Amino acid sequence: MSENNVENGATNDVQGEDGASFNRRLLGWVAWIAGAIALAVIIRVFVAEAYFVPTGSMLETIQLDDRLWGEKISYRLRSPEQGEIIMFDSPANDGNILVKRVIAVGGQTVDLVQGRVVVDGAVLDEPYTGTKESSPLTEQLPGVGPITYPYTVPEGYLWVMGDNRTNSRDSRYFGAIPVSSVTAHAVCTFWPPQNFRLL
């Protein structure tokens, strides 16, 4: 009788250890998954993020349906510069992120003359537009217009335009954007693989 009690006790101890071991493994997996999720969120918020481009406003530089990487570190150290491609919160407050090229920064004056962009009196060399004309838009975002030229960009703001000048709602439509609305600096397109390019 006592032997059976000892054996039963031993069997119960082994079952108890197996249960504790399973619980430890389960907690380990939960901690690992939670850590991975936390790391992914930190990277997305503070380091880099992938973006999907659903429109053709940046053709031919960025293709329709391309995916691109935007890094978020450099703009914590400096402001965006002329010529850089950026992502920013849509001025229409519709929750969208837009991608455009910085044409002028605060204090610079933008003019559109005979289909060319003129900044501070100098015509920009813009091979990325594919010779498309850069003309004023007749339509503006409600509450913004009319935008008249020459236009001096306020300090703390950026004038941005899509490379596809004949099919882009940009600062000609919604005006200059605040630097604070910029979410990332475009680094490269990465998908589909054949469209990979540094920006």
Image (cartoon, helix red, strand yellow):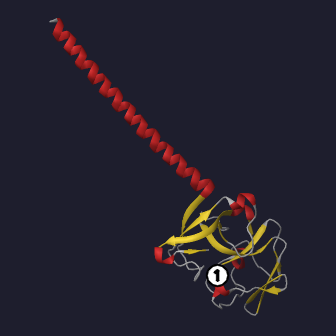
Q: Residue at x 53, y 52 (%)?
A: 40
For residue 22, side relative to residue 71 (left or right): left
For residue 16, side relative to residue 72 (left or right): left
Q: Residues within 10 Å of mark 1 (few under 14, many from 20)?
A: many
* Residue 84 sits above or below residue 38 on the image: below
Report the label total. Answer: 1
Q: Residue at x 61, y 56 (%)?
A: 47
The x, y position of residue 172, in whole percent, is 71, 79
* Residue 80 sits above or below residue 110 on the image: above
- The part of the image, by quadrant, that contains residue 77 is bottom right
Farthest residue, direction bottom: 114
* Residue 142 sits above or below residue 183 on the image: below
Farthest residue, direction left: 1
The x, y position of residue 126, in whole percent, is 70, 85
Residues 152 and 72: in front is 72
The x, y position of residue 88, in whole percent, is 65, 66
The quarter of the image holding the C terminus is bottom right
SS under mark 1: loop
Q: Let me know if residue 62 appears in the view.
A: yes
Q: Let me know if residue 140 appears in the view.
A: no
The x, y position of residue 30, in whole percent, is 43, 39
Which residue matches tag 1? Answer: 163
Q: What amino acid type is highlighted by mark number 1?
A: Asp
